Image (cartoon, grey):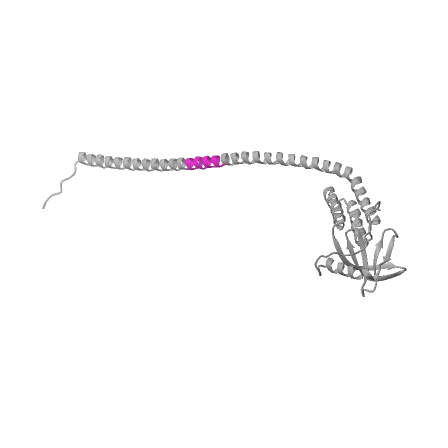
Amino acid sequence: MHRIPKRTPSASVALAAVLAGALSVAHAQEASIRTQVETDAAAAASQARIDGYDSAATDALQAYRLATQRGESLTVYNQQLRRLIDSQAEEIASIKRQTAEIEDIETGALPFMIEMTNTLVRIVEADVPFLRNERLARIDALKAMIDRADVTAGEKYRRIMEAYSIEADYGNTIEAYRGELEQDGSVRAVDFLRIGRVGLYYQTLDGAETGRWSARLGGWQPLADSYRRSVRDGLSIARKQAPPSMLRLPLTAPEGAS
């Protein structure tokens, strides 16, 4: 049998010292690892904060750029708006001046237009009595228009001159129309023939009677049967039912003529 050698006290102490050293190294390594982990975590957190600051700075810079661009756009818009407002103010001032001028013109022209209308009345009353009701109705419409505030002075003047033009054309045209003839207290339907302003004739619808307006007598005057055909032909010519031809008819001489 072999004998197990007995450990000496010095050997035990040496073993214990080795074990203690090993434990100390292990603890030191664990502490070093823990410190490294903590350092890495702190570095990561710091980097995250830095990244956050960088992102915030980028966002702030972008917002600043957008705000700057918007400010520049608003400045340009405000300048354009100011020019527009100034232009509108000038236009309003111009309209006010024109309105005042128009009011002055209308105030000065109103008596003149009233007198022109009254002159038309005198023309119709002194003229050969053709289309009398129609012509007087036109003048009444002019008088009513002159009193209207919603019609401009220019339009009033234009309408009055238009009426004068119509009256002037009567002197250069031939016309046939049907109407009523008041004579000796009776009213008859007849055909009227107007030749300018120098002749106004009538003929009954059956052609049995022919006459003319006499300025000298101030009334209607029957004509001899020899004029019946001329009046009938004149009616056809005025209605464009026959070509123009010479008509043998008595005419109304202008005042002052022999």
State the extent of the magenta-drawn residues as a range.
52-66
Residue 60 falls inside the magenta stretch = yes
Horizontal placement of 70 versus 232: left or right?
left
Which residue is farthest bottom? 206
Q: Is residue 138 visible?
A: yes
What's the residue at 75%, 54% (across, down)?
A: 174
Which residue is farthest right? 185
Rendering coords of residue 32 (x, y %): 30, 35
Q: Please tell me whether the stretch drawn in magenta is mainly helix, strand or loop.
A: helix
Rendering coords of residue 5 (x, y %): 13, 40
In front here: 249 or 52? Answer: 249
Which residue is farthest left? 1
Location of residue 158 by image quarter: top right
In front here: 141 or 25? Answer: 141
Residue 75 sits above or below residue 236 on the image: above
Q: Is residue 150 visible?
A: no
Rendering coords of residue 86 (x, y %): 62, 34
Residue 108 falls inside the magenta stretch = no
What's the residue at 59%, 34% (across, down)?
A: 83
Residue 114 sits above or below residue 214 on the image: above
